[in-house]
Image (spheres, helix red, strand yellow):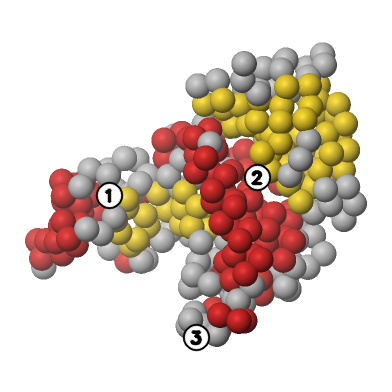
Amino acid sequence: MREYLLGVSRYWIEFGADGWRLDVPEEISDATFWQSFRQATKAANPDAYLVGEIWNDASAWLQGDRFDGVMNYVFSRAALGFFAQNTLKTDYRPGGYELALLDAPAFAAQVEAMLAAHPWGITLTQLNLLDSHDTARVLWMVDGDEAALRLAVLLQMTLPGAPCVYYGSEIGMTGGTDPECRGALPWDKEAEWNTALRDFYRRAIALRHRFPALRIGGFETLYAQDGVYGFARELEGEAMIVLFNGNTTTARIDLPLGKSTGQTGTFQAVWNSGIYTAQAGLLHGVTIPARDGLVLRRATD
């Protein structure tokens, strides 16, 4: 049976599958099986992606001999706790875990802890998702709060990790717990799709693809107070600043620059608008629209 299962993995990878998402892998407690599964899969394609459904501490599974990543529900709970301050259904328990409201400092602390939980190479391959077939849909969890969803999606596409979009979320599908979260995508009812939301997803994904720093760059927290959160991503001299305003009014802040951004230079918006030049290590009067984001890129000579 063991060899048969390893052969199944090899067969589908050789057929062209990009990897495996392994459901409840803890049901097979023999670590040597998963080590052999990884070896068989990677022998067929070294770039194949192995991700496991682990809801709790996954450290033992992410030592380089079993999975490349796990389904990162820590990300989803933190993002919704910060961006859906007035709409989050805190009585809902996805996977039995609490949905708690977070202010900016608490949110920043959770993000820092999440990113520090594993070696950096593993952090970059964590499957960052907002909802799945095992949870209520994200729009249901935030009671239809589309602004909260958009902020969370922008975070998903700019934070370290591998973004995962659950089918239909990009067109506004909603639904509570199973089976409501598993409804069929309404292919024959395109007039009912939220195409503006779909376009937002497309732009956020395109932003991630355009700038390598947003995919594999380093990470540094820059700001976390008064409903505003921001961080920097840097790769080989390309410095990006990503800011989020969870408030219902426009935010204007003096933003301290960090080690990864450098203390000088001009930063121009690539998401929303604005151009800011550093003065004494600060970007003065950075303006972020209400319940929206701002992404800046350091201008190059």
Q: Does 158 sit above or below residue 222?
A: below
Please name the residue shown 61% across and 26% down the image. Answer: 239
In the image shown, does 254 or 195 lie closer to the viewer?
195
Rounded to the nearest whole Å, what is the CA distance between mark 2 and mark 1? 29 Å
Rounded to the nearest whole Å, what is the CA distance between mark 1 and mark 3? 33 Å
The mark nearer the N terminus, 2 or 3, is 2
The image shows residue 223 at horizontal and vertical percentages of 76, 34
Quarter of the image containing the C terminus? top right
Q: Which of the numbered marks, if any, corresponds to residue 48?
A: 1
Name the amino acid type tagged 1.
Answer: Ala
Badge 3 marks a residue whose secondary structure is: loop
Q: Is residue 214 visible?
A: yes
Badge 1 marks a residue whose secondary structure is: loop
Q: Which of the numbered marks, if any, corresponds to residue 153?
A: none
In the image shown, does 79 or 200 lie closer to the viewer?
200
The image shows residue 279 at horizontal and vertical percentages of 82, 16
Q: Does 280 sit above or below residue 129?
A: above
Please name the residue shown 66% across and 66% down the image. Answer: 196
Which residue carries the number 2 mark? Answer: 110
Neighbour tally class for label 3: few under 14, some 14-19, many 20 plus, Cα within 10 Å: few
The image shows residue 112 at horizontal and vertical percentages of 62, 38
Please name the residue shown 67% across and 17% down the image. Answer: 262
Name the amino acid type tagged 3.
Answer: Asp
Question: Quick check: 111 left or right of 124?
Answer: right
Question: Quick check: 231 left or right of 285?
Answer: left
Q: Nearer the viewer, mark 2 or mark 3?
A: 3
Q: Quadrant of residue 97?
A: bottom right
